[in-house]
Structure formats: C-alpha cells, structure tokens
C-alpha cells in the first residue's frame, strides 16, 4: 500500500510539474512575446507567435482572417501605429488555462493602453485562444476576442490571474511604457 501511494504521489507530482513547465513555456513562447511585440510595434515577432494557418476572429465586427491574410494585415497595422507614433502596452489576465499534450485553450481579459500626443486610452476585451505546439514552440492557432458591447472593464481584468511582464527598459508599473 505504501509503495502504491508513493508511486501515485510521484506520478501526480510529475504531472503537476509537467503542467507547470508547459504553462511557463506557453507564457514565454506566446504571451511575453505578444506583449513585447505590441510594445515594440514588432509585426515580425507578432506574426511568429501565430501558426501559418491561424484563424483570427473578431466577434464584434463579424470578421474572420486566415493565415497569410491575417499576417499581412498585422504588418499594415503595426506600420500604421509606427507612422502615427502610437506607443502602447497590452496586459493579460487569465480566467482559464487548459493544456493537453500539444494543445492548449485559454480565456481571459486583455487590457490595451495606447499613448499618443500626451493622451492615453485604455481598451478591454475578452479573448479565447487555442494554442498549438509546433516543433517545440507554442503558437496561437485560433484567436478570438470581443469587448461584449463595451461592457468589459478594469474590474473584469482584475478578476483573473495577471501575467507579469517586466524587462529592463520595457513595460513596467508606471502609467506609460
């Protein structure tokens, strides 16, 4: 009986550790790069965190973009942000995170703050993503979001588990990046 309990404990501990390691890998491969890409307006990095056949759904606008079409739009959008001298940071708060083998599904709230000409604006939205591990790297396979008619707010954002992103010279806790 003692051996059985020890074996069961070892297996459960190993599964927990594996899940933790995979979650850290997801954060590193996807979410931290997502935040950095937005801060640096780096469309190339942003496109790298998506699969080649990514499905992007904007529920509020009833729009779907697939694969290269989506990646081309990203290049245009990031260039427009650069031309308009928009600075920004995006933060994530997770409501659910589930992973099995090379697949993961995560939901949460994002907080996007934009700065331009001494002014700032903050937008919130709810996201649903399906992630796929490809050649050892996690990538976004399906990405959908909604602002639910503008009802998502700071209180919703604070309800989830916040992803912390800190780097020297980058995003911090100040009011601007």
Image: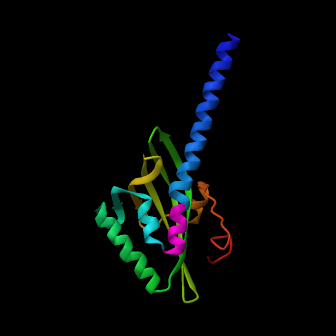
Give the left or right position of residue 162, taking residue 101 as reference.
Answer: right
Q: Residue extending furthest right?
A: 2
Q: Residue at x 32, y 70 (%)?
A: 72
Q: Residue at x 57, y 39 (%)?
A: 19
> Would you place residue 23 above or below residue 120 in this image?
above
**Does 138 appear in magenta?**
no
The image quarter in which residue 149 lies: bottom left
> What percent of the width, then of the height, locates residue 7?
64, 19
Frontmost residue, 3 versus 129:
3
The image quarter in which residue 70 lies: bottom left
Image mark count: 0
Give the left or right position of residue 76, taking residue 165 as reference.
Answer: left
Q: Residue extending furthest bottom?
A: 117
**Does 36 appear in magenta?**
yes
Q: Quadrant of the N terminus?
A: top right
Main secondary-structure element of the magenta-colored stretch = helix
Q: Residue at x 64, y 30 (%)?
A: 13
Q: Residue at x 38, y 73 (%)?
A: 75
Q: Is residue 123 visible?
A: no
Frontmost residue, 37 versus 86:
37
> What percent of the width, then of the height, locates residue 129?
43, 53
Q: Which residues are magenta?
A: 33-41
Frontmost residue, 26 versus 146:
26
> What percent of the width, then of the height, locates residue 4?
64, 14
Q: Residue extending furthest front?
A: 135
Q: Is residue 59 visible?
A: yes
């Amino acid at each position: 009986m003692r051996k059985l309990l020890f074996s069961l404990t070892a297996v459960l501990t190993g599964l927990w550790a594996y899940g933790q390691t995979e979650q850290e890998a997801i954060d590193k491969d996807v979410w931290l790069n997502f935040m950095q890409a937005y801060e640096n307006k780096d469309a190339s990095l942003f496109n790298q965190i998506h699969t080649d056949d990514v499905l992007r759904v904007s529920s509020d606008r009833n729009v779907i973009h697939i694969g290269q079409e989506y990646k081309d739009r990203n290049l245009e959008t990031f260039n427009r942000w650069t031309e308009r001298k928009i600075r920004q940071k995006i933060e994530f708060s997770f409501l659910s995170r589930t992973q099995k083998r090379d697949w993961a599904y995560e939901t949460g709230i994002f907080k996007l703050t934009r700065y331009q000409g001494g002014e700032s604006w903050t937008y919130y939205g709810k996201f649903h993503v399906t992630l796929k591990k490809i050649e050892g790297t996690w990538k976004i396979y399906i990405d959908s979001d909604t602002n639910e008619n503008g009802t998502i707010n700071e209180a919703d954002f604070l309800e989830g588990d916040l992803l912390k992103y800190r780097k020297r010279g980058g995003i911090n806790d100040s009011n601007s990046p």
